Image (tube, rainbow, N blue to C red):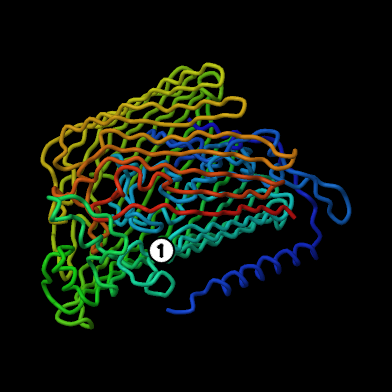
C-alpha cells in the first residue's frame, strides 16, 4: 500500500508566474550552459503503474511521504513576493491525461522516507535480483506475466537502469526547477543526476534530466583505483516537453529517452567451493573471475515518444500515442577460450580467438484511437499498428568477418479500455482488452473498493524474439514456439486500525507453454501447464515517531524444474523520526531483507539471460542496513551503512550462483532541489 501523501493530486493549483521575454531567454541560456558544463565535466578521459493504469500487484512500497513539515518556503523574486517550493513545482504523468484526469498534479517529494533506498535493487524492496553490484544484469525475483501483446526483443537485464515510459514526469512550474542528486558508495558506486524544468510559457514546459553512474569490480581485479577496476558505466538522458493550446482542446506530450550502458562481464567467481571442506562455499573478494578482462557487454537505446489528443464536443477526443525505438546490443570477448575453460560458455563453433556479436532492433509502435467519458464511464478504443525488425551479426572464422540473420514483421492490434467509478474516486472498476489479430490476446479486469481489491487477467503472447532465433560463436537455435499463456487471479483485503494497516494478499498463476532457458542456456518450451501460488502480507504502521513498513511472501510452485523462486521472502524497515533544534529533521532507521535457500538461476553474459542450474545452492541469508536521513530546509542528506551484519555467522553470501553479494560499505548522498 502506497503511503505517500505527496502523490495525492493537487487540483486547481495551475498558477503560472508571468515571465518577460528577456527572462525566458536568460533561462534558456542557463539551461543550455548547465547542460554543456555537466556533459563536459563527466566525459570519460578514455574511450511501477501510475494512477489510472492497471497492473498486477507487486507489493512494493514506493518512496515518499508528506506532511506540513515538507511544505515549500518563501522565495523573493525581483518584483513581488511569491511562494516558490514543492507546491509550485508540480508534475503529472501521461497516464493522467490519457485517462481524462488532465488537472491532476503531484507535488515534488521532499520527505525523508525512502531516500536510503538509492540502489535499484534496494529501491525495488529486493523484488529484483542482480549480480551483486550497481549496474549489473537483473531479473525479477517473482514470476511476472506479460502485460502487452506482440513479440518483444527479450533483452531486459538492463531495463531498471533505463527510464521507462510510465516513469516520465511532465512538469507545470511557476518558476525554474533544478534537481541535483549525488550519491557515493563503496566499490566505486557513484550516481550523479541533474535535472532542469521550466515553463517557457504558461502552456509550454520543457525540461531534461541527465544521469551518470559507475561501479567497480568486487573481485577479479588487482587494483581498486585504476581503469582495470571499472565494472559498469552508465549514461542516461531524458528530454521532455508538454504543450496545451489556448482553448485547451489540443494537448501534446513528447519525450526522448537514451540509455548507454556498458559492463565488463566477469562470469562470476572462479573458485567458489572449498574442496578440503567437502563443498563449503568460499567468499573470496580478491579471487579470480571466470572471464578475461577483455569481455564487455554494451547496450544503447534511443526512444522517441509522442502523445497527442484533440478534444471535440462533449468530451469526445481523438488521441495518438506512440514510440520509435532503436536498440543495439553488443558483446565482445577477445579471449573466449578462458570462458570456455572455466565453464561460462559452451565450446566455440566458429572462431577460437574472438567472440563478437551485435543485435539491432527497430520498432515503430503507435496507437490511434478515440477516448472520452459517457454516463460515468471513461472509455478508450484504438488501433495499434506495430512494425519491427531485428538483425543479428556474429563473427565467423576471424574477428572481422561476420554473418547476419534478420526478421521483420507487421502486427495489427486492436484494443479497448473501460473505467467506471462506483461511488467515489476510491471505488472503481477497470476492464481492458487487447488482441493481435490472429494471434496474441490479453483480457484484464480489476475491482477496487474500500474493503477489498480483486482482479483477473488472461493472456497469450508470442515468445521473445531472442527465444525464437539466435546465432553466435557459442550458441545457436531456431525455434517455432507456441504462444505462452497465463491466467492470473489476485486479491487483497486492507485492514486499517488507527496507525496500523495490514494488507493480506493472494496471487495465483496458471502458466502454460512456458518458455525458459535450460541448463545449457538454450531456449526451450515446456509442453503443459504448472501453477504458482503466492501468499503474502504488507504491513504499515505509523506511530508518533516510530514507523514500520514491511512485506512477506510465501510461494508454492508446482514445477520447480523450470522456474525457481525462493519459497520465503521478507523485506522490512523500521524508522525513528525527530527534529533537532527546530531546523534539522532526522530519520534513523534499520532495513533488512531475507530470502530462503533456492537453486537460483545462473547468468549467461552472451545472451544477457538467466538460465536453470542444478549445482549451486544460493543459501538463505539476512542482509541488514543502518541509515540516517537528514533534511535542512529542502536539502536532504543520506548516511548509510550497508550489510552491517557482515561476519556475523556465515562469512558472506551469494545473490546469484558464483556472484558475491556486496560487503559492508558506507554511502553518502545529497538531494538538492532549487526553485528559482
669 or 154, which lies in front?
Answer: 669
**What is the x, y in percent for residue 40?**
58, 75
Q: Where residue 496 appears, x then y in whole percent? A: 50, 18
Q: Position of residue 46 (x, y in %)?
A: 45, 79
Q: Secondary structure at mark 1?
A: strand
Q: Foreground: 483 or 111? A: 111
Give the residue displayed 36% in from the left and 52% down from the top.
385
Q: What's the residue at 76%, 66% (across, down)?
A: 26
Against 395, residue 412 (above or below) is above
Residue in the image at 56% along x and 59% along y: 193
Tell me the quadrant of the picture where the C terminus can be found: bottom right
In the image, taking residue 81 as reference, residue 26 lies left or right, namely left
Judged left or right of residue 96, residue 516 is left
Q: Looking at the image, how many numbered discs can be counted on the residues?
A: 1
Q: Position of residue 660 (x, y in %)?
A: 30, 54
Of residues 29 and 521, the one drawn nearer to the viewer in this rendering: 521
Circle 1 is placed at which residue position? 301
Location of residue 477 (image quadrant): bottom left
Regarding residue 480, the answer to whether it shows in the image is no
Relative vertical location of residue 420 with respect to residue 333 in this rendering, above or below? above
Q: Judge the density around disc 1: few (<14), some (14-19), many (≥20) Cα neighbours within 10 Å.
A: some
**Residue 658 visible in the displayed image:** yes
Rendered image quadrant of residue 210: bottom right
Give the answer, above or below, for where 123 lies relative to 269: above
Amino acid at each position: 500500500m502506497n503511503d505517500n501523501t505527496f502523490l495525492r493530486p493537487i487540483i486547481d493549483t495551475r498558477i503560472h508566474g508571468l515571465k518577460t521575454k528577456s527572462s525566458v531567454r536568460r533561462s534558456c541560456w542557463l539551461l543550455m550552459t548547465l547542460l554543456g558544463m555537466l556533459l563536459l565535466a563527466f566525459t570519460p578521459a578514455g574511450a511501477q503503474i501510475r494512477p489510472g493504469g492497471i497492473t498486477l500487484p507487486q507489493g512494493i512500497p514506493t518512496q515518499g511521504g508528506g506532511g506540513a513539515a515538507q511544505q515549500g518556503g518563501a522565495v523573493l523574486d525581483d518584483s513581488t513576493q511569491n511562494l516558490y517550493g514543492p507546491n509550485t513545482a508540480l508534475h503529472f504523468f501521461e497516464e493522467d491525461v490519457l485517462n481524462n484526469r488532465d488537472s491532476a498534479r503531484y507535488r515534488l517529494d521532499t520527505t525523508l522516507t525512502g531516500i536510503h533506498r538509492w540502489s535499484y535493487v534496494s529501491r525495488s524492496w529486493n523484488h529484483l535480483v542482480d549480480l551483486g553490484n550497481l549496474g549489473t544484469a537483473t531479473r525479477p525475483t517473482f514470476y511476472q506475466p506479460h502485460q502487452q501483446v506482440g513479440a518483444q526483443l527479450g533483452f531486459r537485464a538492463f531495463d531498471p537502469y533505463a527510464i521507462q515510459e510510465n516513469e516520465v514526469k511532465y512538469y507545470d512550474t511557476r518558476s525554474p526547477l533544478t534537481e541535483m542528486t549525488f550519491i557515493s558508495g563503496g566499490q566505486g558506486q557513484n550516481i550523479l543526476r541533474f535535472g532542469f524544468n521550466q515553463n517557457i510559457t504558461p502552456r509550454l514546459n520543457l525540461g531534461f534530466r541527465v544521469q551518470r553512474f559507475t561501479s567497480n569490480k568486487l573481485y577479479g581485479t588487482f587494483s581498486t583505483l585504476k581503469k582495470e577496476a571499472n565494472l559498469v558505466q552508465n549514461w542516461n538522458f531524458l528530454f521532455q516537453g508538454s504543450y496545451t493550446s489556448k482553448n485547451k482542446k489540443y494537448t501534446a506530450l513528447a519525450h526522448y529517452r537514451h540509455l548507454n550502458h556498458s559492463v565488463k562481464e566477469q562470469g562470476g567467481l572462479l573458485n567458489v567451493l572449498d574442496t578440503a571442506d567437502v563443498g563449503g562455499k568460499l567468499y573470496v573478494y580478491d579471487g579470480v573471475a571466470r572471464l578475461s578482462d577483455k569481455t564487455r557487454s554494451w547496450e544503447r537505446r534511443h526512444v522517441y515518444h509522442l502523445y497527442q489528443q484533440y478534444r471535440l464536443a462533449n468530451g469526445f477526443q481523438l488521441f495518438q500515442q506512440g514510440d520509435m525505438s532503436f536498440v543495439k546490443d553488443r558483446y565482445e570477448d577477445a579471449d573466449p577460450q578462458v570462458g570456455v575453460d572455466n565453464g561460462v560458455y559452451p565450446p566455440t563453433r566458429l572462431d577460437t580467438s574472438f567472440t563478437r556479436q551485435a543485435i539491432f532492433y527497430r520498432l515503430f509502435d503507435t496507437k490511434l484511437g478515440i477516448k472520452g467519458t459517457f454516463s460515468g464511464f471513461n472509455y478508450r478504443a484504438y488501433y495499434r499498428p506495430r512494425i519491427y525488425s531485428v538483425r543479428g551479426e556474429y563473427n565467423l572464422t576471424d574477428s572481422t568477418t561476420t554473418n547476419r540473420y534478420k526478421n521483420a514483421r507487421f502486427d495489427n492490434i486492436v484494443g479497448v479500455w473501460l473505467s467506471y467509478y462506483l461511488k467515489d474516486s476510491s471505488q472503481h472498476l477497470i476492464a481492458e482488452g487487447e488482441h493481435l489479430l490472429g494471434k496474441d490476446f490479453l483480457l484484464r479486469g480489476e475491482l477496487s473498493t474500500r474493503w477489498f481489491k480483486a482482479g483477473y487477467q488472461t493472456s497469450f503472447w508470442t515468445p521473445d524474439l531472442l527465444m525464437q532465433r539466435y546465432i553466435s560463436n557459442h550458441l545457436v537455435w531456431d525455434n517455432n514456439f507456441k504462444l505462452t499463456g497465463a491466467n492470473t487471479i489476485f486479491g487483497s483485503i486492507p485492514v486499517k486500525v488507527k496507525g496500523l494497516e495490514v494488507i493480506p494478499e493472494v496471487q495465483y498463476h496458471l502458466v502454460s507453454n512456458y518458455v525458459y532457458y535450460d541448463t545449457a542456456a538454450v531456449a526451450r518450451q515446456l509442453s503443459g501447464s504448472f501453477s504458482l501460488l503466492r501468499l503474502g502480507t504488507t504491513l504499515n504502521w505509523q506511530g508518533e515517531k516510530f514507523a514500520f513498513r514491511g512485506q512477506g511472501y510465501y510461494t508454492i510452485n508446482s514445477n520447480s524444474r523450470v522456474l525457481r523462486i525462493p519459497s520465503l521472502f521478507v523485506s522490512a524497515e523500521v524508522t525513528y523520526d525527530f527534529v533537532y533544534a527546530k531546523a534539522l529533521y532526522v530519520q534513523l532507521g534499520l532495513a533488512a531483507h531475507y530470502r530462503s535457500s533456492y537453486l537460483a538461476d545462473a547468468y549467461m553474459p552472451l545472451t544477457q539471460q538467466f538460465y536453470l542450474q542444478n549445482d549451486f545452492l544460493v543459501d538463505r541469508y539476512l542482509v541488514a542496513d543502518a541509515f540516517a536521513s537528514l533534511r535542512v530546509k529542502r536539502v536532504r542528506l543520506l548516511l548509510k551503512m550497508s550489510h552491517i551484519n557482515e561476519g556475523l555467522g556465515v562469512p558472506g553470501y551469494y545473490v546469484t550462483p558464483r556472484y558475491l553479494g556486496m560487503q559492508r560499505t558506507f554511502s553518502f548522498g545529497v538531494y538538492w532541489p532549487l526553485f528559482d
